[in-house]
Amino acid sequence: MAPSDATVAVALPRSFSSRRARELMTGYLYLVPVAIALGGTIVVPILKAMHMSLFNYVLIKPQEYGFVGLGNYTRLLRDETFWLTLWNSFVWVFGSVSLQFLGGFAAALLLHQSFRGRAFVRTVTLLPWIVPGVVVALVWEWLYQPNYGVINDVLLRAGVLRDRVAWLSDPGLAMPAVIATNVWRGVPFFAIMLLAGLQAIPEDLYEAARVDGAPVTRRFWHITLPLLRPIIIVATATRVIWTFNYADLIFVMTGGGPANATQITSTYTLLMAYANLDFGYAATLSVVLLVIMLVFTVLYLRVTRGIESVT
Amino acid sequence: MDDRWAPSRRQLLQTMAAAGVVAAADLAWWEEPLVRPGRAWGAQPVRFQFSVPEPKRTALVESLAQRFNQAQKDFEVKVEFVPQAQARQKLVTSIAANNPPDCCQVWDNWVGEFEGMGAVEDLTPRVRDWKHGKDVTPIAWQTVTVKGKILSFPWVVTNDGVYWRTDRAREYGITPPREDWTWDEFRAAARAFTKLDKNQYGFGMRGQGTWAILYATEFMYANGAQVLKDGKVAVNSKEAVEGLEWYLDLFRKDKVCPPSVPTDGWRGIVEGFGRGVTNMYIHNSGSSEEQKDFVGAQNFATLPLPIGPAKKRTSFYFSETLTAFRNGKNREGAWRFMAWLMDDEPNFMYCKTLGLLPARKTLADRPEFAKDPAYAGFIRSFPFSIVSPYLAHAGWGGKLDSEGVPLFQQALVGKLTAREFLDKFADVLAKNMT
């Protein structure tokens, strides 16, 4: 029996574009909460900081509030302390990260070996990373205390020192001292990251190299290091960004002193905002910090793209 | 019938309650259990911000607020405790956001800044009729008077003196100085007190915080210098440079100070003395009660600052104030609470517990202050005490710390000479005369 016209179901014509549009719309709707959250917590504050940096905005001088254009940026270029803090930031970041990396790498290689109690040692190695930064700063401040700190006491008893050393009060020693503390805290980060990378390297490669008679140094240079390269770059870049913005340790241990010897740009920004209450200039410093980090990130992305193509 | 007396449950509870009241009354009043009173119907809240450097103050101020709340029915004070390091910043931001507390406790060097923001309630008309107005020393009123207006109550006052280890002086055969001792005698004592083999130093100089500069300035004044002369910054005068040079050399050349000086703040100098590392330091009376616990009341005394080559000496006088805000929601309640805190018992207990001196003469004359050797150096310094010259301009308040102190530290560690430091410091002051 031939079907009558009335019983034939005819699909309504639907254009591909409207279906695609609905899918796109659904996708974007899913993104809305994240976009609102990121926009509200990151984009808006950044735009607000950029806006504030164009104003003379000192909280204790409301009558002087006004648009100054690039006035704060001009002031920054002439500010000797800013340039000093930028140099200090460079020393702080590269001193800390390079030593953290070396220490972390050595620790990762050791922890990769088989020995009794390895699980316990791995857990203990993580401790400095687990302890909150402010607690680390307070503990080390006391260790460094020149009059009754443990470090001076031990070194004097061991005959290494003849006089007490003011680790945090001597401008020549203060920066190395805070870097040493940061290294102590950051070594576990690299150790764990690199240990994970070491465990992912197939043992077959080492076996083959051993069969070919490659000594341990060549195995390290030609297998371990190249295969760890992506992790090294990611971990190092991440750590550089963190350390550049990391103000807690210095803020608690020295407050940027003595005589600005440990004043880095992020602590200087805090000082301008919360001691001088000069929000316009503090915003300018923040924007400059952001630009420096953006430049670094762009370079980093280029390098990692290179790595991806290699790997 | 059994006629033995057996108390009913009601009688037992009444007896226990009475025993509790007697026991509470027997305690020192500020240690009484804090029984929160029921809020009186219609009592209006009063917001009081207090910066807390130590737990003792927290308990004390909470107790004071509750006593005030119990003493009247119109207002209920709620204390907002903030860390001292953030107190100024929190107040300034709350003023900028038009939501200040009704009243607060702040140091006098901040009041000018708040007045510059047009935020402080002018107390002048009320103070004229206040019952204790004439009992407050004129110099205490000076610390809270800006452009002819009384802006705060001087809750407590203090000035600087020298803490001196009497037991160590006896041990090392150092003659206790006369009250009118000189710079030379001060340095000689600092040298005699310095025993490097015992990790002991003569003088605990302060290198961090605003008062690092204030103590150095007191020595500059003893050499005939001034911060302002004829309304212009004169802090880099020849007398100032020489006075500062002498003071810095105690650390740089004479080596009578511990190596931690450039980063030693208030806690550093107080603990250095308390732990026996230093044998003299300059501070206000606020650490005298602490030192009684640290080194023992019998082992230290306080002295006026030494006389300089200009045959002068100066101690900077300052006050911890009670300040109310123009945009506070309960200005009447703020006034009533602040005036109550200045009354005999609350004011006496606050000062005595914290080792600070009352601004009211009748209280300062009590033997607890006048006869205690721990306060002698400060009381004897009143005749030559002056209001800190850095109170002259509101814009100097924050700059002393953020720009002055790093420069001072550079002078301490020899990166700047005394002349270079004072020239740069004078520039900072001249640029911020607001």
Image (cartoon, coloured by chain):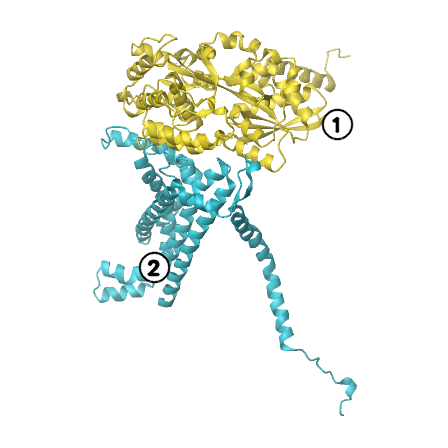
Chain colours: A cyan, B yellow
Q: Nearer the viewer, residue A68 or B124?
A: A68
| Residue B63 image offset from top left, x and y in percent | 60, 22
Image disc number at residue B254? none
**Which quadrant holds the N terminus of chain A?**
bottom right
Amino acid type of the residue that numbered disc 1 sits on in the rendered structure: Gly
Left or right, residue B421 beside residue B348: left
| Residue B8 image offset from top left, x and y in percent | 74, 17
| Residue A224 image offset from top left, x and y in percent | 30, 60
The answer for which chain carries disc 1 is B
Residue B414 picture quarter: top left
Left or right, residue B217 beside residue B366: left
Amino acid type of the residue that numbered disc 2 sits on in the rendered structure: Leu
Q: Nearer the viewer, residue B411 or B190?
A: B411
| Residue A247 image offset from top left, x and y in percent | 43, 42
Left or right, residue A104 beside residue A270: left
Residue under pointer 2: A228
Residue B116 drawn above or below residue A27: above
